[in-house]
Amino acid sequence: MQEALLTIKNLVKTFPIKGGILSKEIASVKAVSDVSLEIARGETLGLVGESGCGKSTLGKLILRLIEPTQGQIFFNGQDITHIKPEELRKLRRNMQIIFQDPYASLNPRMIVEDILMEPLQIHGLGKNKTEKRNRVFKLLDLVGLRRESISRYPHEFSGGQRQRICIARALAVEPDFIVCDEPVSALDVSIQAQIINLMQDLQKELSLTYLFIAHDLKVVEHISNRVAVMYLGKIVELTTSEKVYADPKHPYTKALLSAIPIPDPTYKKERVILRGDVPSPINPPSGCYFHPRCPIAKDNCSKDSPILRELTTPSNSHIASCHYA
């Protein structure tokens, strides 16, 4: 594995639930539970799981958009877990995010020029307005938008074009690392392919590193080098993209993959039907969080929490948290 650009160790995020007249804390939700990951420079790590499992929260924790309850975050070898606001502001140049909804993440009262000029002004990039405008033109060229778009408002664009503007805004400060928080889930399938191809081209051209959050496993397969599967705030499996699709080990991963539709009516595959619903993170199950829904669960699964462990593979690059993987 190449040099790690980002390393997170034992990251935990707990949100308090308050109630009563005095708004006292009556319970808590552990949205992210003891997550450790490394992302190598230049790679794309796909993060998948059901809605509400903590994927977006993890992405925001990494960028310090929300503060972790416990754990450490290292970026480019520097511990950024508790750095001061002025240091964090400088770091923002190297770490950016593309949000899920291109309709909500752009200011409807700003034209494209102002949207793309704003990060340049905040970080002091460009000597004068002419140089900044030339940078904006280059950004539009990079993401495949016409230069005439500079004077238009977000509502004048389609969903795919808006997401291109969001990508251009993230690239404006020349970052090394981008959290892609379900960037294509709100788009039509044909547009999804265009945006994914654009992101791959940009990664090669600009040497970017991605954390790609999604719930569509086919999209993740196409863009990711490695895939981490998340369930109820925990990573349950982590391996290369090829291995997770060819030989999944965790029963939750197998269930997710079995739900992918195959566009061939003659092809038959075994469906893994999970019983029940996702447990509440306010009161998670004992032992393995997945055991109430697991088709292969045994008595010890409800008592002993499995740890992420390396499985016996030739390259030792496949880890999973299951007693029977």
Image (spheres, rainbow, N blue to C red):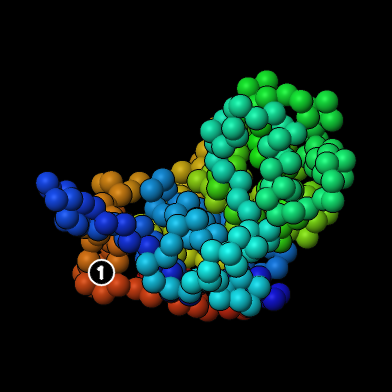
The residue positioned 36% from the left and 57% from the top of the image is: 31
The residue positioned 60% from the left and 60% from the top of the image is: 89
Q: Residue 282: give x, y in percent of width and height.
A: 24, 55
Q: Is residue 290 rendered to the left or right of residue 211?
A: left
Relative height, residue 153 to residue 181 (above, below):
above
- Kindly indicate the quadrant of the structure image that contains residue 90: bottom right
* The one of 311 and 180 positioned closer to us in this rendering: 180
Image quarter in which the C terminus is found = bottom left
Q: Residues within 10 Å of mark 1 (few under 14, many from 20)?
A: some
Q: Most extreme residue toward the top, as rendered? A: 156
Q: Is residue 91 rendered to the left or right of residue 120?
A: left
**Amino acid marked by disc 1:** Gly
* The one of 211 and 271 positioned closer to us in this rendering: 211
Q: Residue 77: give x, y in percent of width and height.
A: 63, 77
Image quarter in which the N terminus is found = bottom right
The answer to whether residue 213 is visible is yes
Q: Most extreme residue toward the left, as rendered? A: 21
The answer to whether residue 292 is visible is no
